[in-house]
Amino acid sequence: MADHSPEAGSAPQRPAGRRRHPAARPTDDDMLDAASAVFSEAGFHAATMDVLAARARSTKPTLYAHFGSKEDLFGKCADLAADTLASALFEAYAAAADLPLEQQVRAGVASFFDYADVHPGRFRLLFGAHATGSAAEARQRLMSAATREITRRIRYFTKRHGRGAWGTSAELCASFVVGLVVEGARYTLVADSLDPASAAEFTTQFAVAALRHIDPHLADALDARE
């Protein structure tokens, strides 16, 4: 009877059709997300290229080839975070443009809180303790754009409801709203006991109550000093 067993010392045959596939290579956005997390945790100076490459499941040569120097990588992380958050915010603003005040505020607040929840590394890069240099500049561009848009909406609301066309007072209110939302989202991100959706709704109602109950005479007095 013929012996069909493998010869001694021969390698076992791998079953056909079961080739091993290498792990999927991270995309540029994957690597930027990983780098954002490292930068937000350690700061720019303490984040080494070795650590950045390891977190990105990549290599230092790959990071250099895709993004340039560490300074360039940091800048690209900051720009990605600011640009994608701005896109989410302004899409929410546009979708709610014809809705009542409370729903407009809710749309913007929810978009901001959602972004912090889904992209914590990007959010912390812009608004965390290590937000310096390119991150601070990107954050300022974002907050300035959001403040201008909210100022425009506050002026439209006050004029439509017979409170006059607010000037500096509208800008001040808008800066309050932006600061409230940033701090609310930042606090929610570090407080594990808070549900982001509930915290966003709480922030919405707080902001709307403040906007509705401002004494218009105070706004007039403030604007009279312009």
Image (spheres, helix red, strand yellow):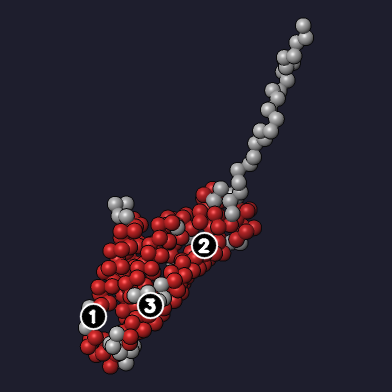
The amino acid type, in three-letter code, at marker 3 is Ile
Looking at the image, is 38 positioned above or below residue 106? above
The x and y percentages for residue 207 are 29, 71
Looking at the rendered structure, the secondary structure element under dot 3 is: helix
Instruction: Answer with left or right where residue 110 lies relative to residue 51.
Output: left
**The C terminus appears in which quarter of the rendering?**
bottom left
Looking at the image, is 95 positioned above or below residue 12? below
The x and y percentages for residue 208 are 28, 73
Looking at the image, is 81 positioned above or below residue 9? below
How many badges with numbers are in the image? 3
The mark found on residue 150 in the picture is 3
- How crowded pointer 2 is (Cα within 10 Å; few <14, some 14-19, many 20+) is rated as many
The mark found on residue 77 in the picture is 2
The amino acid type, in three-letter code, at marker 2 is Cys
Residue 71 appears in the figure: no
Q: Return the residue at label 1.
A: 214
Whole-angstrom CA distance, mark 1 to mark 2, is 39 Å
Instruction: Answer with left or right where residue 48 lies relative to residue 152.
Output: right
Mark 1 or 2, closer to the camera = 1
**The N terminus appears in which quarter of the rendering?**
top right
Residue at 44 percent of width and 71 percent of height: 95
Mark 3 or 2, closer to the camera = 3
Q: Nearest the camera: 116 or 43? A: 116
- How crowded pointer 3 is (Cα within 10 Å; few <14, some 14-19, many 20+) is rated as many
The amino acid type, in three-letter code, at marker 1 is Ile
Earlier in the chain: of badge 1 and badge 2, it is 2
